[in-house]
Image (cartoon, rainbow, N blue to C red):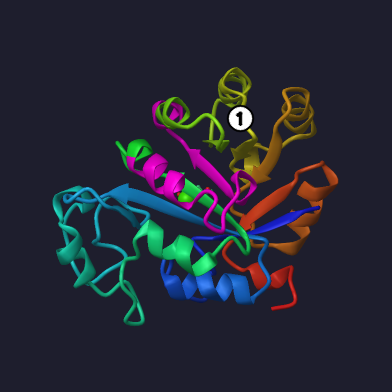
Amino acid sequence: MFLIIGHRGASGTEPENTLRSFRKAVDMGADGIELDVHTCATGEIVVIHDDTVDRTTNGSGKVSDLSLDRLRELDAGSGERIPLLTEVLDLIGGRVLVNIELKGDDTARGVGSVISSYLGRGYGPEDLLVSSFKPTELSDLISIRDDIRIGVLFEDHPEMYLDFSHQIGAYSVHPGKDLVTPSLVRRSVDIGCHVLAWSVNDREEADVLRSMGVNGIFTDHPQYWTRG
Ligand code: G3P
Ligand code: CA
């Protein structure tokens, strides 16, 4: 199985990290979706990549300084609103894998609590994968729930992150695509981790990664590999 995971949904054609983008990725036949989360000023877990709203909406300011009500007034593209994590989980309903990337600081506790309320309600542990570039967020999540699949993201120092992945019993490692080598894949297999590479938008590049034993890719264009 070579997983095709829609990066921020189907962000090559839709506004990233919106319900519209996630719906499109599923319609395109993606095996999973990836999304980024932050905690806003009123404590809810919201789906947005940057720590400010400046790039992806018509507003400005830090997500952590803005209330949910204020965030909901913003246009995140094509009239879409910044979604709550719960709204994405409701939309997907366990049909495909949801990879939640802990992008902001202090997101582990809120995400752990959201996950706890969805497990057994259309989601099993195999339907969710929580990743981060931040080892402390991952460790915090594990201390809250130790039954969730963890993915370790990195774009440098692969040996260090592989050691950390081994130490925490990660389900998968998520290297930037340029870091993937046959030896990185071998070492990942040795420590019991799947390899999911990001972000891949070229078919030939995907073929090379697949031939190295990579288990899946994050892509802005899931339709390149699916029936969509
Ligand atoms: O999870 C893979 C990828 O999303 C990591 O980079 O910057 O797109 O969050 P970024
Ligand atoms: Ca991400």
Left or right, residue 85 beside residue 74: right
Can the viewer see residue 103?
no
Look at the image and say whether residue 117 sits in the magenta stretch.
Answer: yes
At label 1, counting other C-alpha atoms closer than 10 Å, the crowd grade (few under 14, some 14-19, many 20 or more) is many
x and y percentages locating residue 111 in the rendered image: 39, 44
Residue 105 in sight in this render: yes
Residue 48 is inside the magenta segment: no
Please determine whether, in this image, residue 186 is positioned above or below residue 55: above
Q: Position of residue 48 (x, y in %)?
A: 35, 57
Amino acid type, callout 1? Ala
27 in relation to 84, above or below: below
- Give me the residue at 59% from left, 25% from top: 165
Location of residue 80 with respect to 193 vertically, above or below: below
| Residue appearing at x 16%, y 65% in the figure | 69
Secondary structure beneath disc 1? Answer: loop
Question: Which of the two residues, 75 or 200, is positioned nearer the viewer here?
Answer: 75
Quarter holding residue 27: bottom right
Image quadrant occupied by the C terminus: bottom right
* Residue found 53% across the figure and 66% down from its top: 92
Q: Is residue 155 left or right of residue 197?
A: left
Camera-side residue of 161 and 88: 88
Residue 118 in percent (x, y) is at 47, 52
Name the residue at the front extreme: 120
The residue where tag 1 is placed is 170
Query: Residues in magenta?
Result: 110-139
Give percent across and percent down for residue 201. 64, 62
